[in-house]
């Protein structure tokens, strides 16, 4: 009986750990369309930068993004593996899977972004940097 309960506990722990990053991979097209959103943007003086960040367990494909001050930045997050989000410090923006956020890069400096959805053991490694020159 104790052995059975121990095995059940291990199986449940593994299942819960895997669901942190395992969700969100397959979605209907209507769900993807409903999930897309953008935020109001004031007019930028620079160019428009369309950036797509691909997230998988446990990394972003673009750990460093460079733009110029005044650029209008449009960031889309694509989850190719697992369920992730991006929180961009300094600009107070959060992007969840398959969403787009648009803003004007009106502050120069380096701004950290990280995964905003707890996704498992490598979650803390999911960081990057937006550099506004």
Image (cartoon, rainbow, N blue to C red):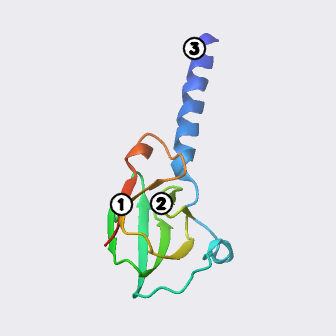
Which of 22 and 132 lies nearest the eye of the viewer? 132
Nearest to the observer: residue 132 or residue 2: 132
Foreground: disc 1 or disc 2: 2
**Mark 2 — residue?**
90
Discs 3, 2 touching: Cβ within 8 Å: no
Check disc 2: other Cα within 10 Å, few if <14, some if 14-19, many if 20+. Answer: few
Whether residue 93 sits left or right of residue 64 in the image: it is right
Quarter that holds the C terminus: bottom left
Residue 3 is labelled as 3
Q: Quadrant of the N terminus?
A: top right
Q: Position of residue 15 (x, y in %)?
A: 57, 38
Mark nearer the N terminus (1 vs 2) = 2
Query: Compared to 29, does 4 lie above or below?
Result: above
Q: Residue at x 58, y 54 (%)?
A: 23
* Residue 29 on image: x %, y %: 63, 77
Answer with the quarter of the image where residue 92 lies.
bottom right
Quadrant housing residue 38: bottom right
**Cβ–Cβ below 8 Å for labels 1 and 3?**
no
Q: SS at mark 3?
A: helix
Residue at 40%, 87% (x, y): give it.
46
| In the foreground, 19 or 37 | 37
Give x and y (percent) for residue 104: 48, 78
Q: Secondary structure at mark 1?
A: strand
Q: Nearer the viewer, residue 7 or 129?
A: 129
Graded by Cα atoms within 10 Å as few (under 14), some (14 to 19) or many (20 or more), the crowding at tag 3 reads: few
Q: Earlier in the sequence, mark 3 or mark 2?
A: 3
Residue occupied by mark 1: 129
């Amino acid at each position: 009986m104790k052995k059975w309960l121990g095995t059940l506990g291990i199986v449940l722990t593994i299942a819960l750990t895997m669901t942190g990053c395992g969700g969100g991979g397959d979605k209907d097209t209507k769900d993807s369309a409903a999930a897309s959103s953008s935020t109001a943007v004031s007019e930028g003086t620079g160019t428009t930068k369309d950036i797509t960040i691909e997230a998988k367990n446990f990394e972003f494909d673009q750990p460093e993004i460079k733009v110029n001050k005044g650029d209008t930045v449009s960031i889309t997050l694509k989850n190719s593996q697992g369920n992730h989000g991006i929180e961009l410090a300094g600009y107070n923006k959060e992007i969840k899977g398959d969403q787009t956020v648009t803003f004007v890069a009106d502050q120069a400096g380096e701004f950290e972004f990280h995964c905003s959805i707890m996704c498992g053991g490598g979650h803390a490694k999911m960081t990057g940097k937006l550099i506004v020159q």
